[in-house]
Image (cartoon, rainbow, N blue to C red):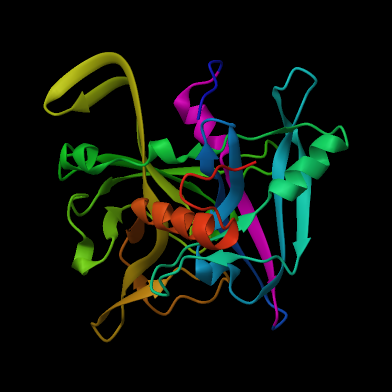
Amino acid sequence: MANQEMRLSNMVTYSTVLLQCQYKDGTAGTGTGFIMNLCRDAESNCYFPVVITNKHVAKGSVKCVFGFCKADAAGMPIDNESFIFDLENSAWIEHPDPEVDLCCMPIGAQLNAIASSGIKLFYIPLETNLIPDRQEIDSLSAIEDVIMIGYPIGLSDTINHKPVIRKGITATHLKYDYQGKKQFLIDCACFPGSSGSPVFILNEGIVHQNGNLTIGGNRILFLGVLFAGPQFAATGNITYADLPVVPRPITNIPTNLGLVIKSSEILVLEAYIRENILKLKPGEHLQ
């Protein structure tokens, strides 16, 4: 992720898309997706662009609609003009672990066709180098400020083609696997439509890290993907449920906590794509 003309906080708003899905049973729902380049080959500068979201957002969909900003002749965004992707019967690639609620849709062919037609798009894909390694995770404190980018209850600035930004804190330490799974909790308002939202640590101007304060620095870490949240039932039971994509009357009480899949699971999905979709052998490069 690099654009010298923009602040980090502006850049991340060009990485997400509002997913509007139509399902086999005739219903429709919304979720959040984000654009990411996987399997990047440093030598050839080739990569596998995808839109990532939750399995439960895409499951049973027969059509998926989302839009990118158009760009002007200089390559700068035209925020109030969008190009709509209308993909029917799209083949979603699922994370190989059935318990990990992640999937992705390849969009390379569509992007190449659009570029060939002379239409310019503006988007800023996430890169895997934003995923923190073990050392970076261990350096974090138990309480970190986080931001989440997405479309709660399908809300967005439709005129300016912008998502909604939420802010919260980590509710469990990133260095631990919450309940033994590659997940963690955030204290942030999470609503239907937020499923698939990327969660970041994003600091501009002031960075507090390892007990040190840096003035004039920037930091961005891609921590994970929201997929569910605990709810308190009227009977007094605590349940965990996927955040629905189809709005429905609320019978449980949200706790303003969200379950987030650790971004390291995207590397597992990337390895699965490399070996089973692209069928690259060790040492073999994308063309």
Please give the name of the residue rendered at 51% of the width and 31% of the height, measured from the top-left corner.
42
Please indicate, yes or no, whether residue 243 appears anywhere in the rendered image. Answer: yes
Badge count: 0
Please indicate, yes or no, whether residue 203 appears anywhere in the rendered image. Answer: no
Q: Compared to 44, does 131 lie above or below?
A: below
Q: Compared to 169, does 95 lie above or below?
A: below
Q: Is residue 287 left or right of residue 39?
A: right
- Spot occupied by residue 137 in the image (x, y as percentages of width and height): 22, 42
Q: Compared to 29, does 68 lie above or below?
A: above
- Spot occupied by residue 91 in the image (x, y as percentages of width and height): 67, 66
Q: Residue placed farthest to the left in the image? A: 211
Please give the name of the residue rendered at 23% of the width and 37% of the height, measured from the top-left corner.
136
Q: Compared to 7, does 248 lie above or below?
A: below
Q: Is residue 121 left or right of residue 157?
A: right
Residue nearest the viewer, comparing 50 with 87: 50
Range of magenta residues: 6-24
**Quarter of the image with the C terminus in it:** top right
Q: Is residue 107 magenta?
A: no
Q: Is residue 211 left or right of residue 49?
A: left
- Spot occupied by residue 245 in the image (x, y as percentages of width and height): 56, 68
Please give the name of the residue rendered at 56% of the width and 71% of the height, measured from the top-left corner.
247
Q: Is residue 11 magenta?
A: yes
Residue nearest the viewer, comparing 271 with 150: 271
- Spot occupied by residue 61 in the image (x, y as percentages of width and height): 66, 72
Q: Is residue 126 left or right of residue 145?
A: right
Residue nearest the viewer, comparing 105 with 70: 105
Q: Residue placed farthest to the top in the image? A: 216
Q: Residue placed farthest to the right in the image? A: 117
